[in-house]
Amino acid sequence: MDKIRPLVILGVDPGLASTGVGVIQQVGQREWRALFHGHVTTGEATPLPARLDKIFRLVEDAVEEYRPSFLSIESIFFAVNVRSAVLMAHGRGVALLAAAQRGVEVHEYAPAEIKQSVVGRGRATKEQVGQMVTTLLKLDAPPRVDHEADALAAALCHAFRGVTPLAAQVARAADRPTRDDDGYAARRELLGKMLTGRKRRRR
């Protein structure tokens, strides 16, 4: 009988100027570890097709190397800045194409939903996201680039919200609110302790 392969999720924080990816693997009923996180940047002086090719290859390489069952990606939020949303859409498009060509199931989450799921606050700061990702994945240090931390957070969001336990390798998205996932209360408590610790250090 073949051994069940541990569940792997690829998170993507899309953008045209910079795109981050983060790969996590399930190691227990509620535990995950980071396999990889990285990013690419593209400059405005570079032709658009070349910029998109660079993003596509980043996601394609991650898919080929780690064979994720799911890709979790940030959805577009138009209310902030339409131009930024359009630029972000370019990066999202090639990331989705890389996943589709290899049959990876895609799930989209709003930015606030990702923060709510991972940090416990929909308006969490970049620093808080990085700290919580570091704690939850037991990283030696926070990712140096925000886009990498956000990509890992996107992957964790789907891990907490959308997938079934490790034994059910046929995992599919579960239709339930973020706050109902098993570890939500624990992450809220952890965030509270982190913020309390910071206040004490400032005194």
Image: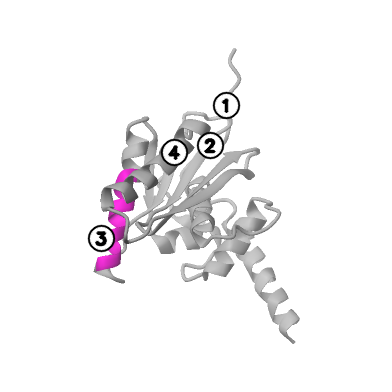
Q: Amino acid at mark 3?
A: Val
Residue that carries the numbered disc 3 in the rendered image: 86
Report the coloring of the rendering: one colour
Residue that carries the numbered disc 1 in the rendered image: 5
Res 160 seen here: no
Mark 1 and mark 2: Cα distance apart in space: 9 Å
Question: In percent of the image, x 48 and y 35: which residue is there?
Answer: 68
Location of the N terminus (image quadrant): top right
- Relative height, residue 113 to residue 125 (above, below): above
Residue that carries the numbered disc 2 in the rendered image: 8
Label 3 Cα crowd, 10 Å radius (few <14 / some 14-19 / many 20+)? some
Residue that carries the numbered disc 4 in the rendered image: 70
Q: Amino acid at mark 4?
A: Phe
Asked if disc 1 and disc 2 are in contact, CB closer than 8 Å, the reply is yes
Occupied quadrant, residue 13: bottom left
Question: In percent of the image, x 39 and y 34: which residue is there?
Answer: 104
- Mark 1 / mark 4, whichever is N-terminal: 1
**Residue 105: x, y in percent?**
38, 36
Magenta stretch contains residue 89? yes
